[in-house]
Image (tube, rainbow, N blue to C red):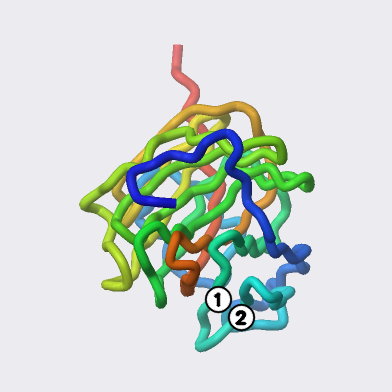
Amino acid sequence: MPFGTTPTPSESPSNTMTAPPSPSDSSSPRPSQTPAAPVAIGGRLYFEDFARPAAWNLQASSSGAVSVLDGRLLLSVHDPAATILQPVPIEPLGDFYAEVELRPVVCSPGDEYGMTIRVKPSGGHYRISLLCEGAARLLRVLPEQTNALTSVTPSDSIIPGGEGTNRLGIAAQGPHLRLFVNRQLVLEDRDSRLPVGGLGLFARPGPGGQTTVAFDNLAVYALAPTPTPTP
């Protein structure tokens, strides 16, 4: 999809590769520190540094492949009509804050990558996208149509192309969705169609037809409870 455009209702992911979640392994290494998150967070719900390939149900097809290499999850797509969606082995979530580090290895104009949240068994989800041009957007993807919750929005907080690693964060609290890049607020919107669901990572090439993105240090936290006002 060219930079600066938004999807039409007819746009929907095709040739989507998915894999069922696998049980998480509590023996995985855990960072000891609590991050300086841009929102008030509570306890950690999940952490993955991709040091255990066996914990992930990896696969390949004619459109691309998912692999773990050197402690990073790689999503590689070489079909301009395909989207790779790799489910995260975590229980469905409603309200949470999630962060992941991602770096494009092969990145061309129009390529998108990021997180999917509140993923339903039917395939419906919110798609939290970074674009190689240094922009972001929020989509609501349903089996019958895809809608842009925001337009494609450039941001100086996003390192473009393959020049560096971006830290993508998403805070979901009821209908309120906030997208952070390198812990700076980039986009926010409200939508109540999908209140709860799974988590995933995705990559989708633009007109060039090929992209590869590396993901690392995925962490999910509960949101801190809102203080009750004292009478």
Front one among 49 and 63: 63
Are the residues flagged by discs 2 and 1 in contact, CB closer than 8 Å?
yes
Q: Element type at marker 2?
A: strand
Residue 55 place in picture, x, y as percent: 71, 76
Instruction: Please identify the residue farthest to the bottom as the structure is shown.
Output: 70
Side of 158 relative to 85 (left or right)? left
The residue at the point 45 percent across, 11 percent down is 231
On the image, numbered disc 2 is attached to which residue?
A: 67
Other-residue count near label 2 (Cα within 10 Å), few / some / many at <14 / 14–19 / ≥20: some
Instruction: Please determine whether, in this image, residue 201 is positioned above or below residue 50.
Output: above
The residue at the point 74 percent across, 74 percent down is 57
Residue 145 place in picture, x, y as percent: 64, 36
Instruction: Please determine whether, in this image, residue 217 is positioned above or below residue 201.
Output: below
Q: Can I make out residue 129 in this image?
A: yes
Residue 195 place in picture, x, y as percent: 65, 33
The residue at the point 27 percent across, 47 percent down is 154
Side of 91 relative to 76 (left or right)? right
Residue 25 found in image quarter: bottom right
What residue type is disc 2 on? Ser
Q: CA distance from mark 2 to mark 1?
A: 6 Å
Q: Can I make out residue 224 in this image?
A: no
Residue 2 place in picture, x, y as percent: 38, 51
The residue at the point 49 percent across, 35 percent down is 148
On the image, numbered disc 1 is attached to which residue?
A: 73
Q: How many marks?
A: 2
What residue type is disc 1 on? Leu
